């Protein structure tokens, strides 16, 4: 269990796959709420706008002053958490995304042996090196995060143990073949429902380098292959 954030607290946070599927509407409202008290309008008579949703007639503002505390980037947060878990020693990640997707990644890395501590938007991950991950006694749950499942598949492909990855009902309907293909070319043994959908069963193996041309652009597939290449057991092509 990731330290610092109760499971129920994460349930309301935004999900979706790197924001591309438009699943973050709830999270967007939360972000707007977080920003609601940092904007100040200064029209004649100095009226202060207390909230983005404040109703009423307002005179045109001559100036807008204040500051915005922007939320952490989801794509970067996923990748930093995984790299920190593969590194040796402690890494401190500040302004880590509050999205439930990114916390699914943290929980999976914790289940694989990394030490994860959370203090608000600061995450401290202590990794044990490329060969330091261990088999999880339970199924790794990616929640609603396609990024977690696809990138983690790359990491698990070169590990000396077997793993099972699953997710919620929505994630189990999303295709995984585009990441399964290149990882199989590298030597990983991967089983999937209908050879395309989660749950995924991954048996780590000694991988080989490949020259892979993606049929379509995908940051997730590219990241999965690069993370698989971080394995100590990758042999030259």
Image: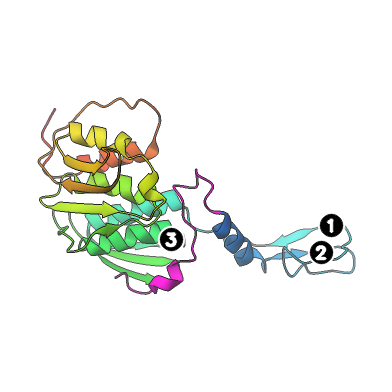
Residue 5 lies, in percent from the top left, at: 39, 73
Q: Residue at x 39, y 35 (%)?
A: 218
Q: Quadrant of the C terminus?
A: top left
Coloring basis for residues: rainbow
Secondary structure of the residue carrying tag 2 is loop
Upstream in the sequence, badge 2 or badge 1?
A: 2
Relative to 94, is 164 on the left or the right?
left
Q: Please identify, in this view, whether the residue under mark 3 or under mark 1 is nearer the observer.
A: 3
The residue nearer to you, when weighing 138 against 66, is 138
Give the dominant element type of the magenta stretch: helix, strand or loop. Answer: loop
Residue designated by label 3:
100
Does the stretch in magenta take in 14?
yes
Residue designated by label 1:
62
Q: Label 1: how many residues lie within 10 Å, few (<14), some (14-19) or many (20+)?
A: few
Q: Quadrant of residue 185?
A: top left
Secondary structure of the residue carrying tag 3 is helix
Q: Which residues are magenta?
A: 1-24
Upstream in the sequence, badge 2 or badge 3?
A: 2
Residue designated by label 2:
42
What is the distance, in whole Å, between disc 2 and disc 1 at their CAs?
6 Å
Does the stretch in magenta take in 184?
no
Query: Could you tell me how many numbered marks the image carries?
Result: 3
Upstream in the sequence, badge 3 or badge 1?
A: 1
What is the distance, in whole Å, between disc 2 and disc 3 at their CAs?
36 Å
Q: Is residue 130 visible?
A: no
Q: Residue at x 84, y 57 (%)?
A: 62
Secondary structure of the residue carrying tag 1 is loop
| Contact flag, marks 2 and 1 (Cβ < 8 Å) | yes
Q: Residue at x 76, y 59 (%)?
A: 64
Q: Quadrant of the N terminus?
A: bottom left
Residue 24 lies, in percent from the top left, at: 53, 53
């Amino acid at each position: 269990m990731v330290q610092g954030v109760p499971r129920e607290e994460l349930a309301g946070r935004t999900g979706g796959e790197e924001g591309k599927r438009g699943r973050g509407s709830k999270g967007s409202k939360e972000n707007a709420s977080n920003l609601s008290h940092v904007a100040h309008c200064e029209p004649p008579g100095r009226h202060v706008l207390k909230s983005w949703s404040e109703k009423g007639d307002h005179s045109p503002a001559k100036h807008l002053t204040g500051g915005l505390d922007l939320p952490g980037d989801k794509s970067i947060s996923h990748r930093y958490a995984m790299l920190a878990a593969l590194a040796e020693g402690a890494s401190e990640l500040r302004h880590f995304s509050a999205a439930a997707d990114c916390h699914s990644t943290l929980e999976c890395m914790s289940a694989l042996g990394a030490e994860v501590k959370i203090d608000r938007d600061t995450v401290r991950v202590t990794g044990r090196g490329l060969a330091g991950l261990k088999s999880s006694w339970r199924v790794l749950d990616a929640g609603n995060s396609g990024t977690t499942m696809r990138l983690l598949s790359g990491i698990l492909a070169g590990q000396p143990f077997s793993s099972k990855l699953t997710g919620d009902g929505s994630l189990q309907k999303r295709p995984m073949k585009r990441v399964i293909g290149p990882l199989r070319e590298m030597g990983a043994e991967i089983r999937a429902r209908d050879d395309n959908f989660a749950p995924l069963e991954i048996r780590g193996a000694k991988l080989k380098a490949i020259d892979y041309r993606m049929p379509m652009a995908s940051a997730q597939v590219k990241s999965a292959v690069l993370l698989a290449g971080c394995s100590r057991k990758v042999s030259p092509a």
